[in-house]
Image (cartoon, rainbow, N blue to C red):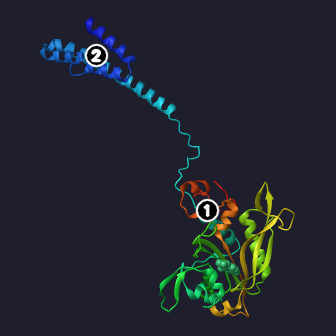
Amino acid sequence: MNTTDRTRLDETLVAIAAADADELEAQRVAVLGKAGWISAALKTLGGMSPEERQIEGPRIQGMRAAVADAIDARKAVLDAAALEKQLTSEVLDLTLPAPETPRGSVHPVSQVMDELAEIFADMGFSVATGPEIEDDWHNFTALNMAETHPARAMHDTFYFPDKDGEGRRMLLRTHTSPVQIRSMIEKGAPLRIIAPGRVYRSDSDATHTPMFHQIEGLVIDEGIHLGHLKWTLETFLKAFFERDDIVLRLRPSYFPFTEPSVEVDVGWQDVAGRRVLGGDGDAPGHGWMELLGSGMVNRRLFEFTGLDPEKWSGFAFGVGVDRLAMLKYGMDDLRAFFDGDGRWLAHYGFSAFDQPTLSAGVGARA
Ligand code: DAH
């Protein structure tokens, strides 16, 4: 091997052994590329005598192979180092919880309805629904509010110009109570339902919106009495407000569809200037807050729906869902519920993953 080539080869191998990725490519081009010096040496083989070629051929090929092997070896080292660097810089800890991607939130009204369904399901109630466009008979007459009944005046609503097939006036239902009638007719007795939903009245100010939400409860069975009503409401309110010290006061009242009728108040106490539910409302510094209407199902409803009032009795109640949400989550303006303001929802809304359950707490926040 001539000394020039030997020196060049040594220099090349040293350079390759220390090259980074760019330098390695430069070496490859300078040595093995089209105009590289080994490529040029290979080309000289064509002009040699066979004897000469027998000696020069293996020598030049040997140099080419040495350089090619050195490049491969260096490349393997550089690739391994690059991979190592990537592995140490891009740490991925699979044991960390995945970051939550917030996609909207659950409205407090929906959340409270889910909480109520969870609580009442535990007491054997199923969820019933009825139409929001209701007819006059289900909304009023069958609930013992005849055409001229004065109680209709408190339920002014939006009427439709057309009547249904049986000549009944159509209207936006003013309460969820017509679902009592529909369930009694469709399912008969015994019966244990709640009926959450939208209701409408032509009312609009800071504490009234033309649309709001109610939940109706109805139990019909043999031997049902006021004690069952009181226990059910107490159990429901303790679970809903997540407090054991909820105290109820039943006051005589009047609703056409219940007899006797009671208005249910719940005791509150003053905690650092705020009214917090819980405790006996008659204790000093405490008070009572009206919460819902209820009573024993009026026997006229059994007659209207074809159930035997001698065999069955029942209780019913109706409560505002928006009001329950306001009391539980400390929201003070009813109108904000229906403004669709994203900031309000971001503040009061619930994560879609926060499913109410009795074991995890019905109103647990994520
Ligand atoms: N439907 C009544 C209203 O909207 C509320 C109500 C009162 C419902 C007493 C009931 C009940 O089931 O028993 O004003």
Farthest residue to the top: give it: 3
Q: 274 or 228: which is nearer to us?
A: 274
Farthest residue to the right: give it: 284
Q: Which residue was labeled with disc 2?
A: 63
- Asked if residue 45 lies left or right of residue 178, the reply is left
Query: What secondary structure is found at the residue carrying circle 2?
Result: helix
| Image coords of residue 252 (percent x, y) | 78, 81
- Say whether residue 293 is visible: yes
Residue 108 bears which disc, if any?
1
| Residue 151 vertical placement versus 64 (above, below) | below
Q: Quadrant of residue 179?
A: bottom right
Query: What secondary structure is found at the residue carrying circle 1?
Result: helix
* Residue visible at 56% across and 57% down in the picture: 105
* Residue visible at 55% across and 49% down in the picture: 100
- Please identify the quadrant where the N terminus is shown: top left
Type of amino acid at the residue the image marks with label 1: Pro
- Say whether residue 193 is visible: no
Type of amino acid at the residue the image marks with label 2: Met
Q: 210 or 244: which is nearer to us?
A: 210
Determine crowd level at label 2: few under 14, some 14-19, many 20+ residues with C-alpha closer than 10 A. Answer: some
Determine crowd level at label 1: few under 14, some 14-19, many 20+ residues with C-alpha closer than 10 A. Answer: many
